[in-house]
Image: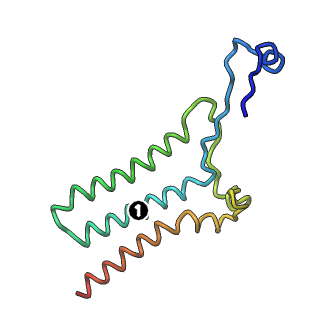
Amino acid sequence: MSKRISTAELAQVVAVTAAPVQTRVDRNFGLPSGLYAATVGLYLAFIGLMAVLFANPELAIPLVVIAAFIAFGFGVAGVWAKMQPENDTRPLSWGQFSNRGIQTLSGPLTASQASVQVLILPVLILVWGLAIAVIVAVQ
């Protein structure tokens, strides 16, 4: 239900000032940069494997575009994490990460559990690419 609030009632609750509100923004993802680098490396390794496996000049442009999308996607996230205003947070170091782990919506994770969660998809994709390479080699 909605209820009309008079200006007098609103003035009792709200204080209006001319000064801008200072905000602190935490754009940090809470993981060491090495995990992001490993994720990008695994995705690009899959694209490189496909480029070597299916060495076809007609696939050169699509594979370069896919690699560029991967690099730009992670690059934009990296730049976004370092943007201002008052963004003074830094990614965890490996020591902090291994000691503290991270907190997720489903509960706390140790460093090894978080690393597995982050890297499982790119590793599975690369293993899938290796399986394709074995199938192509056998034929």
Q: Is residue 72 left or right of residue 21?
A: left
Q: Position of residue 132 (x, y in %)?
A: 32, 78
Q: Residue at x 27, y 59 (%)?
A: 63
Q: Quadrant of the C terminus?
A: bottom left
Colour mode of the rendering: rainbow
Tell me the crowding category of disc 1: few under 14, some 14 to 19, or many 20 or more residues within 10 angstroms, Cα based.
many
Q: Quadrant of the N terminus?
A: top right
Give the vertical position of 85 relative to 5 (above or below): below
Q: Residue at x 68, y 24 (%)?
A: 22
**Secondary element at tag 1:** helix
Q: Position of residue 59 (x, y in %)?
A: 20, 62
Q: Residue at x 74, y 22 (%)?
A: 4
Give the vertical position of 108 relative to 3 (above or below): below
Snapshot quadrant of residue 133? bottom left
Q: Position of residue 30 (x, y in %)?
A: 63, 51
Snapshot quadrant of residue 54? bottom left
Q: Is residue 30 left or right of residue 34?
A: right
Q: Which residue is mark 1?
A: 43
Residue farthest along the bottom direction in this orientation = 138
Give the vertical position of 18 relative to 2 (above or below): above
Q: Residue at x 45, y 43 (%)?
A: 76
Looking at numbered disc 1 in the image, what kind of residue is underneath it?
Tyr
Q: How many marks?
A: 1
Give the vertical position of 127 relative to 3 (above or below): below
Q: Position of residue 23 (x, y in %)?
A: 67, 29
Residue farthest along the left direction in this orientation = 57
Q: Is residue 114 left or right of residue 48?
A: right
Residue farthest along the right direction in this orientation = 12
